[in-house]
Amino acid sequence: MARVKSGILTKKKHKKVLKLAKGYWMTRHKQFKKAKEAVLHAGEYAFAGRKRKKRDFRRLWIIRLNAALKELGIKYSLFIKKLNDKKIGLDRKIISQIAIDYPKVFEKIVKEIMV
């Protein structure tokens, strides 16, 4: 039986990992073992970061809404409850954007909801 050498495949795999590790510090972008470890960790952090981003933005929208509502003398929790009771389909992202870009419109929305 003929001997099969896998040098080509190994080199291809190594090149792929080293390309992903480009720009990493010290041996993490040169040595395959270190690069592989660094790329795996980076992938884990990226995955977690994508989940974290959603949480962070929701917190930001709530903070912005709370600040805009405080100026009008209304609590955030009461506003959200009234919003849900009236079955208004605006989410926190849209409302916070309206509060920043169009304060007069936001004020009208708040008055309509609080009646």
Image (cartoon, rainbow, N blue to C red):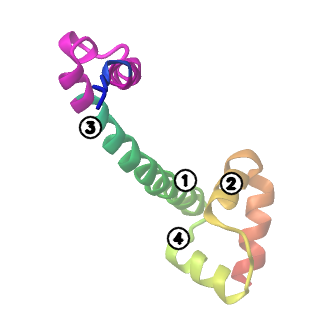
When asked about the image quadrant of residue 89, the answer is bottom right
| The label number, if any, that marks residue 76 in the structure image | 4
Mark closer to the observer (1, 3): 3
**Residue 80, image x and y in percent?**
58, 76
Observer-nearest of 73 and 29: 29
Judged from the image, the secondary structure of the residue bearing numbered disc 4 is helix
Is 14 situated above or below 87?
above
Q: CA distance from mark 4 to mark 3?
A: 39 Å
Q: Is 112 contained in the magenta span?
A: no
Q: CA distance from mark 2 to mark 4?
A: 13 Å
Query: Magenta residues: mostly which secondary structure?
Result: helix
* Amino acid type of the residue tagged 1 in the rendering: Arg
Q: Residue at x 65, y 83 (%)?
A: 84
Q: CA distance from mark 4 to mark 1?
A: 10 Å
Q: CA distance from mark 1 to mark 3?
A: 34 Å
Judged from the image, the secondary structure of the residue bearing numbered disc 3 is helix
**Residue 76, image x and y in percent?**
52, 70
When asked about the image quadrant of residue 7, the answer is top left
Q: Earlier in the sequence, mark 4 or mark 1?
A: 1
**Residue 96, image x and y in percent?**
64, 56
Q: Which residues are magenta?
A: 9-37
Is 16 situated above or below 73?
above
When asked about the image quadrant of residue 88, the answer is bottom right
Q: Which residue is mark 2?
A: 99
* Amino acid type of the residue tagged 3 in the rendering: His
* Amino acid type of the residue tagged 4 in the rendering: Tyr
Q: Which residue is mark 1?
A: 64
Q: Earlier in the sequence, mark 2 or mark 4?
A: 4
